Image (cartoon, grey):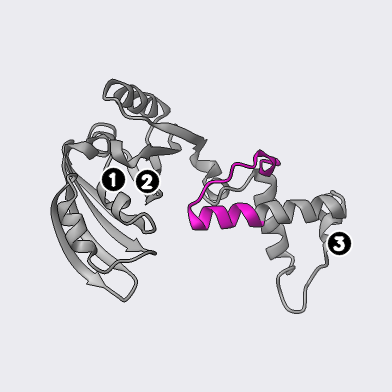
Amino acid sequence: MATIAEFTIPAHEFALSETLERRPDITINIDRVVAHNTSQVVPFVRVTNGEVEGLTEILEADASVMEIELFGETDDERFYRLVWNETAEIVGYMINEHDATVQEATATDGVWHLRVLFPDREDLSAIGEYATENGITLDVKRIYGTDEFEAARYNLTESQHETLSKAIKEGYYEIPRGINTQELANELDISHQALSERFRRATKNLALSALAIEDDDDRNTET
C-alpha cells in the first residue's frame, strides 16, 4: 500500500548546511528534484525570505553543491538548478532504488522538512535502515496512507478537516454567511464551544503548515 511519510533531516547531514548557516533567515523550497543516479541529485530550488543578495556566491562556496545555475530572480526570491554531491544521496536512493516521489522539501533554521510518497510501506522501512547505516538522523514525524493525504498535507486531524470542509460547503465563510456557528455545531453534532475550539486549532495547524514551522504545544493534536 502506498505510504506518505513526513520527516526531518539536519542540514549538516544532508545538503546546504553552510548556506543556511551563513543566511539563517532564508527558506529553501525544492520545486522539483531529479536523481540521475543514487549519488547525483539535481534539485530545482526556490529561495525566499531573508537576504538573497549575494546568495549565488554563497551557494557556489557550499561544499554540498557541485554545480549551480541561476535561472530566475526577483527582488526577494532566487530560482536555481543545483547539482548536489553524495551528501544528499539518500534522496537519490529513495528515488532510484524505491521509486519514491518527493512531494515537498523545505529547509529552514538548519533543518530539512520532507514529505515523500513511497509505493509501499516496506520502502519506508528500507529508507530507515539506510539512514541508520549511513549515520543520517531521519526523524519521522508522520506516516499515513494516500487516502488520508488531503487532511494530513495541511497538518489537520480528521475531525478538523471534516469541520472546515463542512463549513465551506454550508457557506460559513460566505458574505453573508449561509450558516451560523450554532447551526454548524448542530450539523456536526458537537457543542458550540467544541466547534470554536476546533476552528481555532485547525486555523493554527493550517498556519503552521503554510509557514513550515513546528509547534511544541501538544494540546494542538485534538482528533
Q: Quadrant of the N terminus?
A: top left
In the displayed orientation, state which residue is furthest to the front.
22
Q: Nearer the viewer, residue 69 or 167?
A: 69
Q: Is residue 65 above or below residue 53?
A: above
Q: Residue at x 30, y 66 (%)?
A: 52
Marks 1 and 3: which is nearer the front? 1
Q: Residue at x 37, y 64 (%)?
A: 50
Spatial separation of the CA atoms under disc 1 and disc 3: 51 Å
- Identified by mark 1, the residue type is Ser
Q: Nearer the viewer, residue 21 or 222?
A: 21
Q: Which residues are magenta?
A: 203-223
Which residue is identified by label 2?
Answer: 110
Does the magenta-highlighted stretch encompass residue 19? no
Position of residue 37 measured from the top left corner of the image (x, y, whole percent): 15, 39
Spatial separation of the CA atoms under disc 2 and disc 1: 6 Å
Position of residue 122 measured from the top left corner of the image (x, y, whole percent): 39, 24
Label 1 element class? helix
Q: Picture quarter containing residue 30?
A: bottom left
Left or right placement of residue 103 versus residue 191 in this view: left
Which residue is identified by label 3?
Answer: 183
Q: Quadrant of the C terminus?
A: top right
Left or right placement of residue 194 versus residue 129 in this view: right
Q: Is residue 172 above or below residue 41?
A: below
User: Marks 1 and 2: in contact by CB < 8 Å?
Assistant: yes
User: Marks 3 and 1: in contact by CB < 8 Å?
Assistant: no
Label 2 element class? loop
Which residue is identified by label 1?
Answer: 17
Label 3 element class? helix
Spatial separation of the CA atoms under disc 2 and disc 3: 46 Å
Residue 99 seen in the figure: no
Position of residue 65 measured from the top left corner of the image (x, y, whole percent): 17, 49
